Image (cartoon, rainbow, N blue to C red):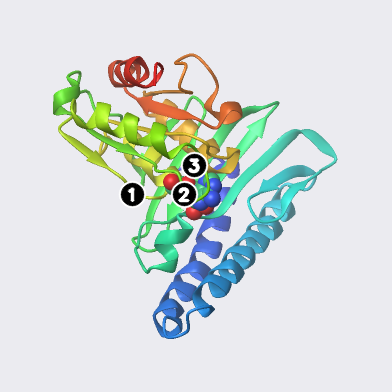
Amino acid sequence: MLYSALINVMVKAARRAGRSLKRDLGEIEHLQVSLKGPANFVSLADKRAEEMLYTDLAKARPGYGFLGEEGGSREGSDKSHTWIVDPLDGTTNFLHGIPQFAISIGLAREGTVIAGVIYNPANDELYIAERGKGAFLNDQRIRVAGRRKLNECVIACGLPHIGRGDHEQSRREMTEIQDKVAGLRRFGAASLDMAFVAAGRLDGYWERNLQAWDIAAGQIMVREAGGIVSGIEGNDNALTTGHVVCGNEFVQAELVKILKPL
Ligand code: 2AM
Ligand code: CA
């Protein structure tokens, strides 16, 4: 598969940071004897991965801005381009040795995401999307699922963490959706949930109160796979609201219809 120079830069960076995370995952088991150890260790793994990504991306594209979960915002001389990076999405899974986590890299030009790479080093699944060029999983073109009946759909959600979000509202949402779908799932890594929607594994996904780095690469992945991504309002921007609803055009619309009034 021949990708653009830009995608090759992103993939190379994701794979190098991925090797580092995979090594660290191997260490997690040994650290579970200590109660405090794993969380600190994961935080270090996270920071190390982000620094690797920053180094590689800044070297390949000097001047681009960089927004990362760990290091925050770093300005560049090129004000129109920004990397939006989550070095470890699905931290809780990683901490527990659950192989559902990813490195997520998006590139925004003038505020629009034009390329995305999502890489799960645990199972070596690499998702790629570039504006106008489609979405790919391990070099195979992917498309969102075609189901139109919600009662045949498998839908994923996110659940707010302790001390975050509105837990009552989240329970109302789950109750409403659970009654109408073939299956409800909660995997715990937003970028991979969106990648799964792009690959047609999931028919839809919603979650509130996310950050730009959770969403950027996933958003272009779903769109390039033929799907729709919005906020809870249905026509708003997930990247700025932090709320995501996605799926094919029917599923996204059905989910919005249910979630909006809640
Ligand atoms: P993270 O692992 O990078 O933090 C799962 O519901 C999603 O929520 C994950 O993508 C996870 O990304 C994110 N997440 C985890 N803890 C969070 C928190 N305290 N606030 C907001 N988002 C969080
Ligand atoms: Ca994240």
> Callout 1 environment at 10 Å: few (<14), some (14 to 19), or many (20+)?
some
User: Are the two marked residues, 1 and 2, in contact with CB atoms closer than 8 angstroms?
Assistant: no
Q: Name the residue type under label 3.
A: Tyr
**First in sequence: mark 1 or mark 2?**
2
Q: Name the residue type under label 1.
A: Phe
Q: Is residue 187 visible?
A: yes
- Residue 196 occupies which quadrant of the picture? top left
Distance (Cα) linking label 1 and label 2: 13 Å
- Above or below — where is 184 with respect to 181? below
Disc 2: which residue: 161
State left or right for residue 176 relative to residue 51: left
* SS of the residue under disc 3: loop
Of badges 1 and 3, nearer the viewer stands: 1
The circle on residue 3 is 3
Along the line of sight, the residue nearer the viewer: 195 or 208: 208
The circle on residue 35 is none
